[in-house]
Image (tube, helix red, strand yellow):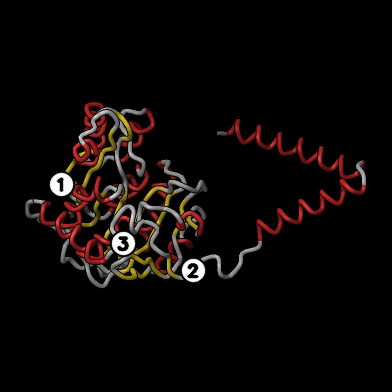
Amino acid sequence: MFLNRVLSIRIFRKERKESMRMFVCGSKKMKKYFIITISLCALLLFYKPACAIPEIRPSILAGTWYPADKNELLEMIGRFLSNAHIAAIKGKIKAIIVPHAGYMYSGGVAAHAFKAIKGKRYKRIIMIGPCHRVFFYGVSVNLQKGYKTPLGIVPVDTKFAKSLIKKSDQIRYVPMAHAFEHCLEIELPFLQVVLKDFKIVPILMGEQDIYTCKELADAILKLLKNEKEPTLILASSDLSHYHSYKEAVSMDSILIQHVKQMDPEELNKDTITGRCEACGKGAIMTALFIAQKCGVKKAIILKYANSGDVTGDHSKVVGYMASVLVK
């Protein structure tokens, strides 16, 4: 990483030097083009039209990843929840880990975790997931006022979100990171069905290294320290991607064991070496770091499956896990 940055700086300096030479020694036409180019770059960087970011984030998944029709969506979620059989859980559920694929693939697995929190009361849900489409450093917390789904608008706890941003220079608001990201929106209709009167804090991780996870976990814990009303942590992540069924089960069992043992350090090591995979490993690790410091006693794996169990194609599958962290 360091060598790449050094090389990038050298290339940038060389290009800047060449541009200035052309500007000084070139024709008037070249100077004109140079000035226009610089002006356009500045405009793109700093001009932000007021209408660019809507107050309410519209659904980008309705009609594709889940039904756009309200009744059809409710029927599908109700069926998933009815088919999810879980044992009674003693203790307070402080966090859940759920997959984020389309409902036809992972909805049956996700329903197990959502059924475990059905009817419980949480003031807010801190939703953490990976950013799949936009690269940025650190962490982004969405400051839009709400998320729209076919079931209505889920309000964002903007006060908490703004306070979180102030807790670390690694946390900020990157609007474009949230505009087309699926990993948090996909969880919302389930939350709308099983819970009432809650707000969300949507967090996307541009970097998922262990240091960023610890920084985010510490920032969240500082804000929750004096909170009397319960907050739920939701980590959104799929597991291994596009391996054979047998290989996926083997890899995913390693990650599941780390979750059971609530060991984010070992999880991090094994994802780095490739022994296991999770696109949202940072979200899982952050949830585990928070769990370690807020009295969570155990992690319960409620359900594991992969896309091959749904499609019948075992050649290239994606793994899914539903888990709860219980105090």
Residue indicated by mark 3: 68
**Residue 104 image offset from top left, x and y in percent:** 24, 48
Q: Nearer the viewer, residue 64 or 268?
A: 64
Q: Image height check: is 316 above or below 194?
A: above
Q: Residues within 10 Å of mark 3 (few under 14, many from 20)?
A: some
Residue indicated by mark 2: 54
Q: CA distance from mark 2 to mark 1?
A: 37 Å
Residue at figure coordinates x 18%, y 61% from the top left: 75
Amino acid found under the numbered disc labelled 3: Ala
Q: Residues within 10 Å of mark 1 (few under 14, many from 20)?
A: many
Which of pointers 2 and 1 lies earlier in the amino acid sequence? Answer: 2
Q: Residues within 10 Å of mark 2 (few under 14, many from 20)?
A: few
Amino acid found under the numbered disc labelled 2: Pro
Q: Residue furthest bottom?
A: 197
In the rendered image, which quarter is residue 119 located in? bottom left
Q: Nearer the viewer, residue 110 or 218?
A: 110
Q: Is residue 98 left or right of residue 163?
A: left
Q: CA distance from mark 2 to mark 3?
A: 20 Å
Secondary element at image label 1: strand
Instruction: Determine whether label 2 and label 3 are within 8 Å by CB.
Output: no
Q: Image height check: is 25 above or below 226?
A: above
Residue indicated by mark 1: 302
Secondary element at image label 2: loop
